[in-house]
Amino acid sequence: MSTSREQSEGHRTLLEIESRFNAKPHGVVIAIQGLQIQALAMFTDLFNQFPYPVVINAAILKLADWFRASNNVIKFYIYKVFKLADQHLIKVFTIEEAMRRVLTVLNSNDPVSRSLALRVLGCMSVIIADKVDVQHAVLQRLEETSDRAEAEAAIWAADRFCAQSAQFSPTVFSTIETKLRDLETNINIKLRLVQLFRHMHHNIAVARQAKSVCVNLVEHKETDQRLVMVALRTLSLLLSQALLDRKEQV
């Protein structure tokens, strides 16, 4: 089968999935959701069978559309599709369109919807990590949220962005430091936050700042033992990449 024929077959398969997703059977809402979840489960095979940019791009745009318009149950299953599709996301060429459709969900009043949007954006980090508007949105949710699940989602997204973008680490550093110093910040959130420092080796000045915060945590008498252990492990990971002060660390 030629490439063009395979691409046409991929588009036909996507249309079949869309038809299943949009089907409106008689019955309760849960039956409709069941059909939608079954349709979403078909995307993994679509990506693997037809890994062509035109097919992948159309599929990701469709998923982003559904994510924007669906309830939280369906949003969760769409997030699972994105999480399994990370190796295919680099083939998306209408990046701005896909990004904006997910980004609009961060304006929701529902912290669960926002949490799922943050996780989808984290999955997309391989193609959007240097987008300033997305970085700002993730940072804003990290700074402003009072919801534990949303905070964890924001940290997860920030972790993915830090791993991909040398620009994001200096931007998010002060927020992490402030939250680590805040006595009101939950210990489990602090444990997640301090691990972000392991990615801050792209910039030597930021790497030194991250190292200093970790050392202060380790040396402070009242630091929770769990946080001391995570800070030590993070220091080791940071200094394995950043070529500074290794003898002092040992």
Image (tube, rainbow, N blue to C red):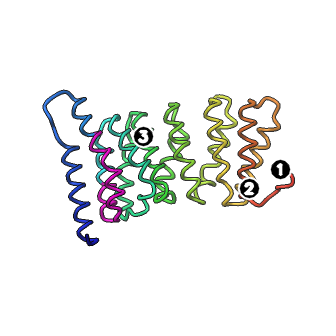
Q: CA–CA distance between discs 1 and 2?
A: 10 Å
Residue 65, placed above or below residue 4 = above
| Percent position of residue 132, x then y | 49, 57
Side of 217 where 73 appears, left or right: left
Side of 215 where 125 appears, left or right: left
- Residue occupying image coordinates x 41% and y 53%: 85
Label 2, secondary structure: give it. Answer: helix
| Percent position of residue 103, x then y | 40, 49
Q: CA–CA distance between discs 3 and 2?
A: 32 Å
Which amino acid lies under the numbered mark 3 shown in the image of this protein?
Leu
Labels 3 and 2 touching (C-beta < 8 A): no
- Residue occupying image coordinates x 71% and y 50%: 237
Label located before the other in sequence (3 or 2): 3
What's the mark number on residue 89? none
| Percent position of residue 225, x then y | 75, 30
Which amino acid lies under the numbered mark 2 shown in the image of this protein?
Ser
| Percent position of residue 250, x then y | 85, 50
Side of 108 where 233 appears, left or right: right
Magenta stretch holds residue 220 = no
Q: Residues within 10 Å of mark 2 (few under 14, many from 20)?
A: few
- Residue occupying image coordinates x 56% and y 42%: 155
Q: Quadrant of residue 163?
A: bottom right
Label located before the other in sequence (3 or 1): 3
What's the mark number on residue 249? 1
Magenta stretch holds residue 43 = yes
What residue is disc 3 on?
116
Look at the image and give the residue range highlighted in magenta.
37-61
Label located before the other in sequence (1 or 2): 2
What residue is disc 2 on?
240
Q: Residues within 10 Å of mark 1 (few under 14, many from 20)?
A: few
